[in-house]
Image (tube, coloured by chain):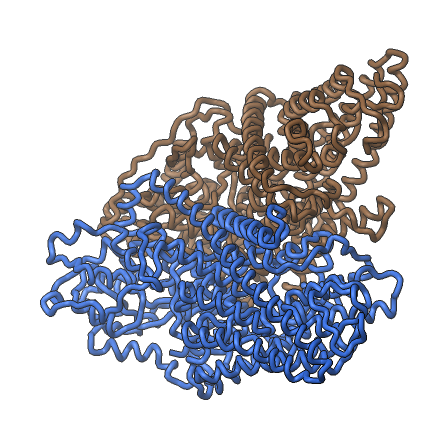
Chain colours: A blue, B brown
Amino acid sequence: MENVQNDISPARGTKYKKMVSINNDSQEDMNSIVVNNEEENLLASVRRRFLISNEKVETGSLNVLSAKYESLDYDTCENYLLLDEVRKKGYKFIVHKSIARWFVFLLIGMITALIACIIDISIEELSIIKYASLSKSVDKYVVEGKLYIPFGLWALYNTVPVLIGSLLVTYVEPIAAGSGIPQVKCYLNGVKIPRVVRVRTLVVKSIGVICSVVGGLAGGKEGPMIHSGAVVAAGISQGKSSTFDKDLNIFRYFREDHEKRDFVSGGAAAGVSAAFGAPVGGVLFSLEEGTSFWNQGLTWRTFFASVVSTFTLNIVLSAYHGVPGDLNYPGLLNLGKFDSFTYELFELPIFMVMGAMGGLFGALWNHINFKITVFRMRYIRPRWLKVIEACIVAAVSASAGFLMMFMLNDCKPLGQDPTKYPTQLYCQDGQYNVLASIWFQTPEASVRSLFHDPPNTHNALSLASFVSVYFLLAVWTFGLSTSNGLFIPTLLTGAAWGRLVSIGMYSILPKTLGHPGRYALIGAAAQLGGVVRMTISLTVIIMETTGNIAFALPLIITLIAAKWTGDFFNEGIYDTLIQLSGVPLLPWEPPPLVNNIYASEVMSHPVVTLKCVENVGHIVELLKLTSYNGFPVVDPPLTDQAEVTTYGRIRGLILRSQLIVMLKKKMFNEISDYWDNVTSSTFRNDYPRYPTIDKISISEEEKTYFVDLRPFMNPSPYTVLHSSSLPRTFRLFRALGLRHLPIVNDSNEVIGMVTRKDLARYRVWRHRGRMGVEELLVSK
Amino acid sequence: MENVQNDISPARGTKYKKMVSINNDSQEDMNSIVVNNEEENLLASVRRRFLISNEKVETGSLNVLSAKYESLDYDTCENYLLLDEVRKKGYKFIVHKSIARWFVFLLIGMITALIACIIDISIEELSIIKYASLSKSVDKYVVEGKLYIPFGLWALYNTVPVLIGSLLVTYVEPIAAGSGIPQVKCYLNGVKIPRVVRVRTLVVKSIGVICSVVGGLAGGKEGPMIHSGAVVAAGISQGKSSTFDKDLNIFRYFREDHEKRDFVSGGAAAGVSAAFGAPVGGVLFSLEEGTSFWNQGLTWRTFFASVVSTFTLNIVLSAYHGVPGDLNYPGLLNLGKFDSFTYELFELPIFMVMGAMGGLFGALWNHINFKITVFRMRYIRPRWLKVIEACIVAAVSASAGFLMMFMLNDCKPLGQDPTKYPTQLYCQDGQYNVLASIWFQTPEASVRSLFHDPPNTHNALSLASFVSVYFLLAVWTFGLSTSNGLFIPTLLTGAAWGRLVSIGMYSILPKTLGHPGRYALIGAAAQLGGVVRMTISLTVIIMETTGNIAFALPLIITLIAAKWTGDFFNEGIYDTLIQLSGVPLLPWEPPPLVNNIYASEVMSHPVVTLKCVENVGHIVELLKLTSYNGFPVVDPPLTDQAEVTTYGRIRGLILRSQLIVMLKKKMFNEISDYWDNVTSSTFRNDYPRYPTIDKISISEEEKTYFVDLRPFMNPSPYTVLHSSSLPRTFRLFRALGLRHLPIVNDSNEVIGMVTRKDLARYRVWRHRGRMGVEELLVSK
């Protein structure tokens, strides 16, 4: 998200004010919008629409919508060509498409899992080399008193991979930075984030995440896995790649926003499934984040992809770990077996309090990270500076770890701890340094230790210092120009303070308690819930990852408490980041108390309209002058009428991309045989990156020609009356996944247009018990 | 459902044919619908609309829609009163409502669970008495050779409770028959099933289910639990009960279809959660069956109710079983611990084949049950006959069990089997009769035995005969005029043949196999999947009930195979029943290949419209003459125009219920002060059972008065153009949960109306690889 935020120019914010005075019953107000279709006035009118956007916006404002994001179009254009295709290809084609669809979901699941395996195995192998060598080096040089050597080594081992990863991310594909979950969330919500589902992003992300985890950053590989799944889905389903400039000419019929978004939701689910071994959680994640209209068929296919993904991963990883066929590795995040975890009734209130603590810590985490992100947007703008910041964090991570194990001489007898590299450091023979064992492994392994280490493995002081240091490291790390997620570091922080709680509990109630790892698990869930605030899907993901349904209730109680506490202070970290970048995300519901705002106030106008049969030169001009993506096609009002009051009666809606294709293919009335080769696929071929109007050469003579838009336009776009309220308009737009919604007057004549930004502008503003509706500024 | 089916008059079926010839570009066809608003012609025109419905319909036809079902209205009427209410009550009211909503969901969860506990404990206690006495009696009289005594006792123990249950269901509340899942499914889909969520239904259902399970019918208590949850939700959320004629005057603001349906979906989820200990499965069930628009807030509350429900049940049942606080009883269906169940890679194909077998058996089951249901609809129509049938089935159940344990002398040494009442019968001392142990317990306990009994407990012959007998019993039982579900008998059948498969597998691969109960579990899942064909929710329910996530993959594979195999032959049993009763259920997606059918062909016309200010006498006449529930309010075309071609420009939509309230409260223009006491709640007070027009007394003088509909009507109903395709119309209707969708021409003038039946008429017709669209007959 970071690269996105930087594009908002730093300046002072202003509040967008709007006159609200529409008389619902009379149409006079509508009529005051005088249509001005003259070419010379068009540019001015377009500027007028974006007048507000020329005012300066404060960097880091949460009250800005960026105008540069476009929407996906979930609505199918049912034009003549589609009807023709349906009629010609018939039922066989539907069966063929349906089988192809299942096959693509199968591939998505398998390939997502294989990428997950590659990432996981690379990290595992490289980490073994790194930490074995470090552990040996510490034990060797501690005797000689040359501890600066292993420290230097550690700093080097951290910085070099992070440098590589950060260079890649910063210079090759900045959209690959971070966890990728906000981007996937936006995509599923219906916002086109440029380059987010491209192969290059996938490659950079995969290498980047290996580098950051091996580099010892406080980051995880789970978020990036979800993003990878989304990219895989988008890539496979389209049967072509712009990165490789390769078109396999398969699955051409899936080349539209609607189908692609369905596949991406399957890919994201497969990613979650691979990351956490949570197929059901994956489906719920996709649903929770993306789908506005629950479609049983899609859900069923998504579930299939998720199951295939976790199954493939399981087979490959089991083989890698030397137990082929044993199928004990359903996900990347392997937290061990929790079979023995149970709970007593009296512990539930304790878990609830821990949930509230998690909500508090999470809100604090989010606040600090928000401040850091705004700082980054303002001051860490040059690319080299971003790389340097990443390297500094890598070095600081090493130093913090080193200082801790050096200063806190927390020793335990060997044999009790399952760590791979028991480092002796200053401990006596037969003992090992507990903190070294936490630091000298991947964060994931540390989480596992905290969950499963027997009682009394850790002492309170080490844990407390670890929590504070790791909390700060994690909050600093997230948002760096590297690929890494926040699940693991958040879980680790939470597990550590959960373990701390268990030590406290043991001192009060020594007898009755079960395994202290249970508190670590609750702490981890609470912290994660407090940071991300996901609801059902997170609960199910944690349930599936731990594989212990009996422990579901404590987890649910904890997560509810964490969410409610956290929501009291601020929003989840993903939502905060999305708001910062000004993406016009549509919430689930229209804001409350806006029934008295009418579509006529929400809509944008003037609208650029086209006639059913339109002059080519005019179209070219329009496309050059405006940035609109959809144009209502109208019967213009008769010019001999005394007063022209509207844009004319609506006949259909045509998209910029369709116009571009028509111009490119010279589908002009004057060229008699153009019709022969035009089918639905003519329009799909260039999807999703249609040429810009500047790339299309139209001769002066051609500019005098005419095109007939009727066979290509959407002949019956959904529209709403100007007197519809904002909630009604919102529900229609959201439920059907629209991109353009023409607003008509009582005679079905176009008077305005509602797009995603017009609706996203109205946001609930909520702060500690008060609530209102604010209108956001749309920045250009 | 049965009582519903019987209402379709028995006769020969005819295929509804329709001329399809609409020219999309011209409006001439539209204009041919000449408006005829004269009172004397109205009745004729209404009759014309239902002309088709007077043709006779074959009983048991799947191609009939019954016109008697009404829709729920998920769309909020944003009239002046609502705006006024929102403005006056402001944000505080929203907060208040939101807190009340959470509180209601809490109550729903708790009360649903308590009802589940009552049912469960009653069944448990009564069953103990019954089977202990039977077992003792058999062992006593077998020595004396008087086996007819225990047999008579058994038949008596079966018949008496079934008689009570059946009398209650048949004579007191017939809608309480069966599992209730089809009814809940219809309600969530948006169809109003009369009396389905009333307290009387709940009482009859609860007692009925206790009677049928204690009576030894092959039926379970899980389906009824889901129905109970729905009733509880509807009852609590409305704060009043028509059965008790009691209005608590609380939660008045929840008295509308939209809110009520949300609560019912929470109640259904709580019911699933209580029945199976599956909170996540419950949420998914509600979503899969009901919600067209995924609403995060609602989902979150539904989840809350589910968790509360399973938690409450757990606490109460744990206390009842003498282990308070131990929380090992999350659901009614207690299948025991499956912790040790694992699987090998090579077993997956075997599971897949078993899934396919389940699909086959399930399809067969559905087919037989369908035939039986049609037979019942035709011949078992008098109520006393239904009661007698139920008693016969009860007696036959006893006889079948008795014959089996008598004829198959399957003995095993004591101590191996966990059954409560080891019956010796003809076995030697120290042995017990295995079949007696299966029959002398509730079916649920038998399922548990089949899952957990050690290898070699059962022999192939006993199992095979048990499977065939129980299969037939179950298929005969489902659809009786008693309250019972099909989950348990289906699981039991499946578990038995799964166990049979395991015996076969052991003889081939004696060494490598794990616990034979695994095959029983797979068989049970396969059979259930084959019968009900639910997808995601069923998978999750079984996962949660078994509490073993490691075994999720085999279950998923099995269920997928079962669904695909079964779908090849026929539909799931619930869907078949719903089709049989002619409920206009809307599927998830519009049927394929109907892009060339336009809204103008789908719509009903003539339409009865009203003017903005309308004569009271005219309204009364209209309401008496027609059965429509929604009337477009229009500006009628000027009469001095040469030709009147439409009903006039749409201004709004008003419901029958609103008109009734206006007439009842005398909101006439001539009564000057009527306005003072009118608020939104005036219209809510009579919800959901408004008086009929015959109950409203309007004097002759009042009939000359006028009413102004504008402040009360929905001023901006969603509409679609006549040229919209069927899929577009369908999506809008389905996604927004509409009840009335006016169809307008290019000038926004009403030309027709689409309701649920008009859309449900177009159904995919699918049979072994071929597919088409059929139009259904609408019966009156």
Image location (x, y in percent) of residue A327: 62, 48
The quarter of the rendered structure image containing the N terminus of chain B is top right
Image location (x, y in percent) of residue B501: 64, 29
Furthest residue toward left: A701
- From this view, report whether residue A419 is shown above or below residue B629: below
Image location (x, y in percent) of residue A56: 42, 86
Question: Which residue is pictured at 56% across the width and 33% down the height?
Answer: B353
- From this view, report whether residue B215 is shown above or below residue A396: above
Say which of B7 and B550 sits in front.
Answer: B550
Say which of A39 and A29 sits in front.
Answer: A39
Question: Which residue is pictured at 41% across the width and 41% down the height?
Answer: B758
Would residue B484 be visible to someone looking at this image?
no
Image location (x, y in percent) of residue A662: 21, 60
Question: Which residue is pictured at 12% across the width and 63% down the height?
Answer: A705
Taking the image as shown, residue A502 lies to the left or right of residue B239, namely right
Taking the image as shown, residue B168 lies to the left or right of residue A329, namely right
Q: Quadrant of residue A710?
A: bottom left
Would residue B368 be visible to someone looking at this image?
yes
Question: Which residue is pictured at 27% across the width and 68% down the height?
Answer: A646
